[in-house]
Amino acid sequence: MVRKISVIIAVVIIAGAFYVRSADASATGLNNIPTSDVVPEKTLALQSWANFGKDQLPTYYSGFKYGPLKGVEIGADGKVGTRKTGPATLQFKCQLPFFGHDSSFMPLVGVENISTNTDRAGKVNPYAVVTYDFTFARIHLGYNFQEDNDGGFGGLDKTITFFNRDLILRTDLKQTDNGDEVLGSVGFLHVLPWNFILESWVSFPSEDEKEETFTVKLNYVISF
């Protein structure tokens, strides 16, 4: 199924190159945590990324996010490549604007890691997160309710202009291993020409035996 998703993404990118309207940046998370952002309505974000690091062979992923309704996002992704593939996992998230007191405050609920193969993909992860837009930066705070691995998370991002395009600086921190460890990260998102968005970050696990992981991610955004 994961390979089928990759083929579909390639076909849509080629087709989208001939019919596409200008689209806003549609990355809807920070580096390792979700935010209250969602893909705009009738917008498709095709994604491909790789994780690599010291003494680590690269692991490749492919997926998509889509906004079927305003404030709602659905998506799927999974590992790809000849070395190792993984079961496709689904995700869903929905903004709760009726709980927000103004446009700068947005709560959201979601669920990720939905799969029929929980032995390989892991358990379903419901979560809740709120985003508040201060003048100096946006702050994100939330909690994962995954069975046997619940924990809090938080992060912030700041948008600046770089070569007349948005450059978003990002950092986040979340609890892992049933709250006994943490995973931190720093990175950026840069809006490129022709509806491409580049993301990259480095993750720092607190476990002594684990090394830093580098991630490079490319998004292609289509608005219908």
Image (spheres, rainbow, N blue to C red):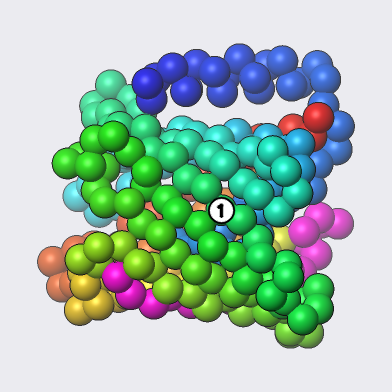
Q: Residue at x 59, y 74 (%)?
A: 130
Q: Nearer the viewer, residue 219 or 134?
A: 134
State the residue in front, 85 or 128.
128
Reply yes or no: does residue 203 show up in magenta: no
Q: SS class of the residue under badge 1?
A: strand
Instruction: Report the residue at 56% width, 53% height from top.
Output: 93
Q: Is residue 189 above or below residue 22?
A: below
Can residue 73 be seen in the rendering of this structure?
Answer: yes
Question: Which of the 4 image quadrants contains residue 82?
Answer: top left
Is residue 139 found left or right of 152 in the rendered image?
Answer: right
Determine which quarter of the picture holds residue 222: top right
Can residue 138 be seen here? The reply is no
* Residue designated by label 1: 93
Write down the region rendered in magenta: 150-166
Going 47% across and 45% down the picture, which residue do you hit?
91
- Measured along the vertical axis of the image, is residue 157 above or below residue 217? below
Which image quadrant: the C terminus?
top right
Residue 161: within the magenta? yes
Q: Position of residue 56 (x, y in %)?
A: 23, 47
Left/right placement of residue 124 relative to residue 218 reads left
Name the spot of residue 146 as percent of width and height, x first. 31, 62
Residue type of the residue flagged with mark 1? Lys
At horizontal 24% and vertical 35% (from top left) the residue drawn is 117
Helix, strand or loop for the magenta stretch, by majority = strand
**Residue 40 position within the rendered picture, expressed as x and y whole percent measured from the top left:** 75, 47
**Residue closest to the far front:** 98
